[in-house]
Image (cartoon, helix red, strand yellow):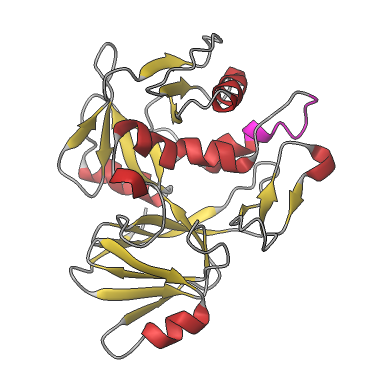
């Protein structure tokens, strides 16, 4: 595994010439980061006005930037080599804790964990009951078991805050699951059963988990000004809004809806991570 790491410190860096999944601007192509914070999100004209000889420029070359995914770790925070393997697969944090241990959120930018707040229910998707917990629901699921799709769909309909994490630990010995595999399966493209739009599964794997563990405050899991710098750049063949309804499977952003785009998902050819920014660290993957 070849991965380069650079500590940007308090350096001001403009990531541009890509696509940015951000509620701040659905047409954003650039992100300005200073230290461990996002300070600006916007389009190329704005990037030009903010770039001078004091700003380092990183050409994204068409990558799509999205908030980091969350993996399943073991009982403790992963060792350095495990962290690097997970980052290279597109994960910027993991859930630790095994057996009866209470799950904790571990960001690769921090030396401490965030405990799961009281009241948040934890269960595997094989348990198909619906709780509608006011505090939220952490779903631990196996990719092979599609029960999690129905659980998340019904809980979201009820207004429950939901996070999705693999039930099994990701290891270097076994191939690490590409995080986009979950959203692809959630679409149920080859089934008559109702699935989930890509955005719903993606959010449960990123911002949803940070909301449950109260990581990053109200901006956690988003690429917006004042949020933590925590994102990954993916190489994708096409971007769109993709639903689980084959009649209206995908469309481009409607300016009135202001819906940002995610990679098109189909089959087993998933987007590949090429760059990551976690706090002050930048990874070339």
What residue sits 36% from the left and 36% below the top?
A: 211
In the rendered structure, the answer to whether residue 35 lies left or right of residue 170 reads: left
Is residue 189 within the magenta segment? yes
| Residue 73, above or below 7 | above
Residue drawn at x 44%, y 80% is 47
**Location of residue 150 in the rendering, given as x and y in whole percent from the top left corner:** 62, 20
User: Going 41% across and 24% down the picture, which residue do you hit?
Assistant: 136
Q: Nearer the viewer, residue 257 or 203?
A: 257
Above or below, 243 relative to 134: below
Q: Is residue 253 rendered to the left or right of residue 130?
A: right
Q: Which residues are magenta?
A: 185-192
Location of residue 65 with respect to 242 vertically, above or below:
below
Q: Is residue 37 visible?
A: yes
Q: Quadrant of residue 143?
A: top right
Left or right of residue 74: residue 17: right
Count every numbered label the image shows and give the total.
Answer: 0
Tell me residue 134's x, y (percent).
Answer: 41, 21
Residue at screen point 29% across, 91% down: 53
Judge whether residue 172 can be spotted in this image.
no
Q: Residue furthest right?
A: 247
In the depicted structure, whether residue 218 falls above or below residue 41 = above
| SS assignment for the magenta stretch, majority | loop
Q: Is residue 56 magenta?
A: no
Query: Horizontal and vertical percent for residue 190?
Result: 78, 31
Horizontal and vertical percent position of residue 32? 36, 71
Q: Quadrant of the C terminus?
A: bottom left
């Amino acid at each position: 595994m070849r991965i380069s790491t650079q500590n940007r410190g308090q350096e001001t860096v403009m990531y541009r010439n890509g696509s940015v999944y951000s509620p701040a601007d659905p047409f954003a192509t650039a992100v300005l980061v200073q230290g461990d914070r996002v300070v600006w999100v916007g389009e190329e004209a704005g990037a030009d006005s903010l770039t001078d000889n004091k700003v380092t420029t990183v050409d994204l070359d068409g990558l799509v930037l999205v908030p980091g995914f969350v993996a399943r770790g073991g009982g403790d925070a992963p060792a350095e080599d495990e962290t690097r393997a997970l980052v290279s697969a597109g994960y910027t944090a993991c859930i630790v804790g095994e057996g009866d241990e209470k799950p904790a959120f571990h960001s690769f930018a921090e030396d401490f964990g965030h405990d799961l707040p009281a009241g948040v229910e934890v269960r595997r998707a094989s348990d198909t009951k619906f709780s509608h917990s006011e505090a939220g629901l952490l779903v631990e699921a196996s990719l092979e078991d599609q029960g999690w799709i129905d659980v998340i769909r019904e809980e979201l309909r009820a207004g429950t805050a939901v996070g999705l994490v693999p039930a099994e630990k990701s290891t270097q010995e076994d191939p690490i699951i590409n995080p986009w595999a979950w959203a692809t399966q959630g679409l149920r493209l080859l089934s008559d059963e109702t699935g989930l739009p890509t955005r719903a599964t993606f959010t449960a794997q990123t911002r949803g988990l940070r909301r449950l563990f109260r990581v990053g405050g109200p901006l956690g899991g988003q690429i917006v000004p004042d949020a933590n710098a925590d994102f990954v750049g993916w190489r994708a063949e096409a971007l769109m809004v993709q639903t689980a309804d084959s009649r209206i499977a995908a469309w481009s952003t409607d300016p009135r809806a202001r819906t940002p785009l995610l990679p098109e998902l189909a089959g087993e050819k998933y987007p590949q991570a090429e760059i990551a920014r976690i706090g002050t660290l930048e990874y070339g993957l």
